[in-house]
């Protein structure tokens, strides 16, 4: 199923239509909030396929989240049909993974390399700091990993990072960075930042690979360009430098990921890299009221190094914007909950029509307390994702260790699972040998014979030996079967005493020696 050319442009304003029907060459779409940028991107893809005769498989469309990629693919499918589900509409990381799975061997990695997520990478950094004898109090693993991630987002190798290090802390992080990368390569693994960095390295090091992708993707479209980091920007420029059919959509006023390495100046860099760039500004807002836009325009007018634009709308004027300055987080939560009650009781607005946004997860606790105190039903959106749950990560770690035995992080994660225990032995050749602890094996055997009374610790050699001595049997007769027998209770008390104290009695002899003859 596909739409006609007239239907494709139906409902677009003048600026949107100009962006959709751009004849070719570099295009920068400065899209304000709520201006329909996703509509422009999807309709441009459909325009290229239906009007310009471009094959769906010659288009690469990139966005930032899997959810946004799925939404874009669904909307393109509504315009061009089921073929959209086979197109390269994905995130930066997904596109890079597809490239690396095919040509990772050119960089010395196996095609089935392991991908470390945030938790796996942090665990490996912890191992590195421990083995380098670096104090985790002075260099917390999370901070070191953040510094390594920032360096990768800037395109800095361990050697380049070490050269730029100026203070002792940076030099220690440079050592950790170098060792971290060495262990990743030894394990045949990459973290999320490596996916981008290595994809760019592949394109730069292998001209035939770069030429192949430039020929394959005649059109490159990128969403949220203001949130790209230098490595992502270089990835886009490399793919588009031959045909120059690249369309990027972004707005410097909406850049919020500078703490993740995003560089708003990439929009300016785009115009310098492609001097013939056409610029289209989407300023008509379809989401907010006029008063909200007036406030937004007044705020963003103070931003430096921005593309000038004034958001406008044909919508209603709307209610006044309210600003409340709270004394602390508790006062802030009380005010927000009070406003919810006012809207619900006075304006008859349903609880499900009200949302509270907060910047960090730590702020949710005090808000939840106020909601519970007021008896307001609520739902926290977010939390631990399915693939971040412990049991899921454990199962995946087993599979990774089977596929890639050199994966140090996955192997160490599962070697003690289930809880029967185990030990790691690092051999001189760098390989790892595992084996169950003998004490644990005995404990498991006793539990299976003991009728399910829970885990039991092995008795000491002294106690086991004393219990079998003939002298004790001669004095006491046959071993009583009843648990209430006084001698059995004394024997058990003596055992516990020896476990607990492991010392000498008042007379200088072992505790319980007069009872057991030990």
Image (cartoon, rainbow, N blue to C red):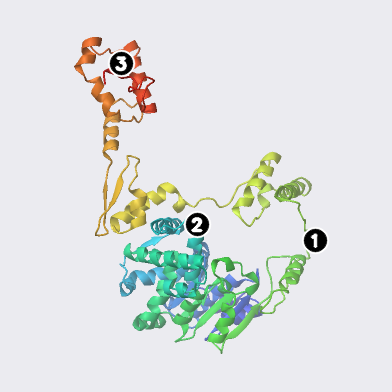
| Secondary element type, mark 1 | loop
CA gap, disc 1 to disc 2? Answer: 46 Å
Answer with mark 3 or mark 1, whichever residue precedes in sequence. 1
Asked whether residue 474 is in view, the answer is yes
**Residue on which disc 1 sits:** 320
In-front residue for pair 517/258: 517
Residue 78 pos. (x, y %): 51, 68
In-front residue for pair 279/327: 327
Q: Is residue 283 left or right of residue 64?
A: right
| Mark nearer the viewer, 1 or 2 | 2
**Residue on which disc 3 sits:** 515
| Secondary element type, mark 2 | loop
| Mark nearer the viewer, 3 or 1 | 3
Q: Is residue 104 left or right of residue 225?
A: left
Packing grade of label 1 (10 A; few <14, some 14-19, many >=20) is: few
Packing grade of label 2 (10 A; few <14, some 14-19, many >=20) is: some
Q: Residue at x 48, y 57 (%)?
A: 141
Q: Is residue 88 above or below residue 503?
A: below
Q: Residue at x 30, y 44 (%)?
A: 422
| Secondary element type, mark 3 | helix
**Residue on which disc 2 sits:** 140
Residue 457 pos. (x, y %): 33, 30
Outermost residue toward the front in this view = 507
Answer with mark 1 or mark 2, whichever residue precedes in sequence. 2
Mark 1 and 2 residues: CB-CB less than 8 Å, in contact?
no
Q: Is residue 461 above or below residue 417?
A: above
| Mark nearer the viewer, 2 or 3 | 3
């Amino acid at each position: 199923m596909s739409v006609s050319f007239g239907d494709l442009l139906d409902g677009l304003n003048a600026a949107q239509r100009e962006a959709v029907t751009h004849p070719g060459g570099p295009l920068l779409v400065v899209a304000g909030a709520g201006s329909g940028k996703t509509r422009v991107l999807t309709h441009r893809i459909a325009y290229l396929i239906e009007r310009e005769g471009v094959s769906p498989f010659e288009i690469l469309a990139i966005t930032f989240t899997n959810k946004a990629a799925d939404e874009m693919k669904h909307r393109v499918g509504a315009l061009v049909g089921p073929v959209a589900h086979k197109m390269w509409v994905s995130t930066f990381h997904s596109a890079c993974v597809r490239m690396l799975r095919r040509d990772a061997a050119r960089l010395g990695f196996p095609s089935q390399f392991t991908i470390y997520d945030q938790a796996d990478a942090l665990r490996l950094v912890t191992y590195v700091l421990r083995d380098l004898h670096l104090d985790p109090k002075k260099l917390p693993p999370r901070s070191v990993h953040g510094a390594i991630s920032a360096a990768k987002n800037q395109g800095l190798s361990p050697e380049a990072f070490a050269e730029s290090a100026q203070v002792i802390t940076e030099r220690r992080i440079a050592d950790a960075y170098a060792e971290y990368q060495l262990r990743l390569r030894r394990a045949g693994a990459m973290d999320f930042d490596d996916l981008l960095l290595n994809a760019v390295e592949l394109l730069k090091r292998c001209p035939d690979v770069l030429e192949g992708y430039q020929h394959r993707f005649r059109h490159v479209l990128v969403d949220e360009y203001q949130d790209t980091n230098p490595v992502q920007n270089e990835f886009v420029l490399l793919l588009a430098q031959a045909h120059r059919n690249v369309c990027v959509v972004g707005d410097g006023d909406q850049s919020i990921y500078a703490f993740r390495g995003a560089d708003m100046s990439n929009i300016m860099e785009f115009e310098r890299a492609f001097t013939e760039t056409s610029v289209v500004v989407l300023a008509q807002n379809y989401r907010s009221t006029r008063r909200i836009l007036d406030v937004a325009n007044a705020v963003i007018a103070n931003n430096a190094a921005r593309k000038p634009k004034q958001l406008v709308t044909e919508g209603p004027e709307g209610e006044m914007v309210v600003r409340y300055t709270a004394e602390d987080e508790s006062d802030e939560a009380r005010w927000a909950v009070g406003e919810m009650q006012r809207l619900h009781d006075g304006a008859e607005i349903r609880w499900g029509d009200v949302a509270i946004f907060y910047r960090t997860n730590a702020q949710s606790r005090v808000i939840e307390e106020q909601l519970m105190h007021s008896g307001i039903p609520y739902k926290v959106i977010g939390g631990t994702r399915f693939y971040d749950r412990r049991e899921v990560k454990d199962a995946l770690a087993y599979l990774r260790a089977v596929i890639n035995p050199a994966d140090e992080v996955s192997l160490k994660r599962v070697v003690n699972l289930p809880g029967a225990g185990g030990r790691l032995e690092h051999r001189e050749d760098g390989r790892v040998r595992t084996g169950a602890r003998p004490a644990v094996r005995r404990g498991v055997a006793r539990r299976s014979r003991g009728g399910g009374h829970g885990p039991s610790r092995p008795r000491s050699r002294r106690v086991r030996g004393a219990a079998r001595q003939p002298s004790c049997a001669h004095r006491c007769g046959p071993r009583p079967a009843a648990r209430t027998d006084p001698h059995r209770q004394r024997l058990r008390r003596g055992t516990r005493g020896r476990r607990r104290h492991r010392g000498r009695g008042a007379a200088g002899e072992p505790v319980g020696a007069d009872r057991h003859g030990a």
